[in-house]
Image (cartoon, rainbow, N blue to C red):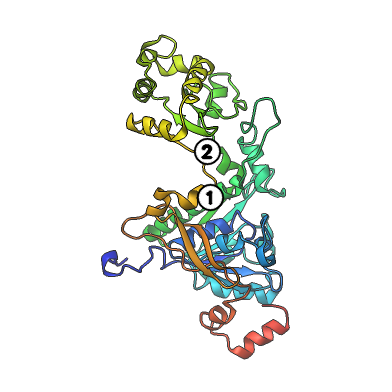
Amino acid sequence: MDTVDAADDPERLPLEDLRVIEMGQLLAGPFCGQLLADFGADVIKLEDPGRGDPMREWGREKPHGLSLWWPVVARGKRSVTINLRTEEGQELVRSLVAQSDILLENFRPGTLERWGLDYPTLKKINPGIILVRVTGYGQTGPYANRAGFGSIGEAMGGIRYVTGDPDSPPSRAGISIGDSLAATFAALGTLVAVHNRTITGEGQVVDTAIYEAVLAMMESLIPEYTLGNYIRERTGAVLPNIAPSNIYPTKDGLLLLIAANQDSVFARLTLAMGQPELAEDPRFVSHSARGANQAMLDEIIARWTSSLETGELEELLQAHGVPEGKIYRAPEMLTDPHFLAREDIITLAHPHFGDMQMHNVAPRLMGTPGRVRWVGPELGEHNFEVLGGLLGLSVDEIAALRERDVV
């Protein structure tokens, strides 16, 4: 593969040589497509004619009756309407596969097979095609055919049980973390498969299960039980035996998160507190000792933080190299100088909202950074561009397909 010096083409995006056909809906598949589009992949999103992805309707706030979620999760994609339940629609997909690198879907297992779009069929059309499948339980196993949503994967994967206060039922995160984790792992698997294809010339199936993506984030939960006979429980704002690392009150009624659980950092915290003897106290002298006396240590620190205004406390901790930070909401993110300096929030033109702000691309690549090119498209906005320009259909042929409710 020829290489291009990014300095010679600063507008080049690193994945712009990849074409992705996105057939999924809601979040688990489409967020994977968003991640790939952020780095330049040509993501052609196939949507049901007249209805589109349900994400077009999702979200708490709906100015002008429109979703604020859709412009984010569909950013950088091209929208094409195809009725996948028709033979003609399925044939259009096969034609697209012949000219694409990746097919991304998050239907229940067996759906593609019923449509004649199974991997062996796709591989005959395009030996290099990579089929990325995101489901609740994966493509195999006794639960494979069950309906599975992100919330169920979060419960099965373990994160729900350990989230929340110990005296309350399991809580959920305020975001769709299960779907997003599965999509992120799917994007990772996609790029691994692309890299392997450069070596072998062969595509493959990337099988991502939501519960497995959650499980992959559960740290040492399994060996803690199998070797330590310990089951992690809900612990609220702290992690057991990780101390000090908590939210502490300030004199002006705010909360500040302080993380000083490493020995050297804890010693710096005690200097900031004016109580250096705490670093030598047998109750707090080591990581294990602080963990065993976590509640006691938190009380000592809270008494100290309560005596200082937030600004004064922050300056003192920063001067001593102690990690600290406020708990941000959207308003704080929009005005924080660090967010502004790194351009973490970008503004894009939206046909109905005007200027629209959203988070920028992550991670940062210094040589070939990603870029958000446009907000989520209108339904079928790119029908003629793709069906005509890519597949070579005439205006009359596309019109005839529309008459038959194929597109």
Q: Work out whether 279 lies above or below 25.
A: above
| Contact, mark 1 vs mark 2 (Cβ under 8 Å) | no
Identify which residue is drawn at 44% across, 11% down.
283
Write down the residue under mark 1.
331
Identify which residue is drawn at 60% across, 89% down.
395
Residue 13 disc label: none
Of labels 1 and 2, the one closer to you: 1
Looking at marks 1 and 2 on the same chain, the residue that comes earlier in the sequence is marked by 2
Q: Residues within 10 Å of mark 1 (few under 14, many from 20)?
A: few
Q: Work out whether 258 lies above or below 76.
A: above
Q: Is residue 303 left or right of residue 68?
A: left
Identify which amino acid the numbered label 1 is placed on.
Pro
Identify which amino acid the numbered label 2 is placed on.
Met
Residue 217 disc label: 2
Q: Work out whether 388 lies above or below 221.
A: below
Quarter of the figure with the N terminus: bottom left
Residue 184 image offset from top left, x and y in percent? 51, 50
Residue 328 image offset from top left, x and y in percent? 52, 43
Work out whether residue 289 or residue 179 is closer to the camera in this orientation and state it.
289
Q: Work out whether 395 lies above or below 83.
A: below
Q: Residues within 10 Å of mark 2 (few under 14, many from 20)?
A: few
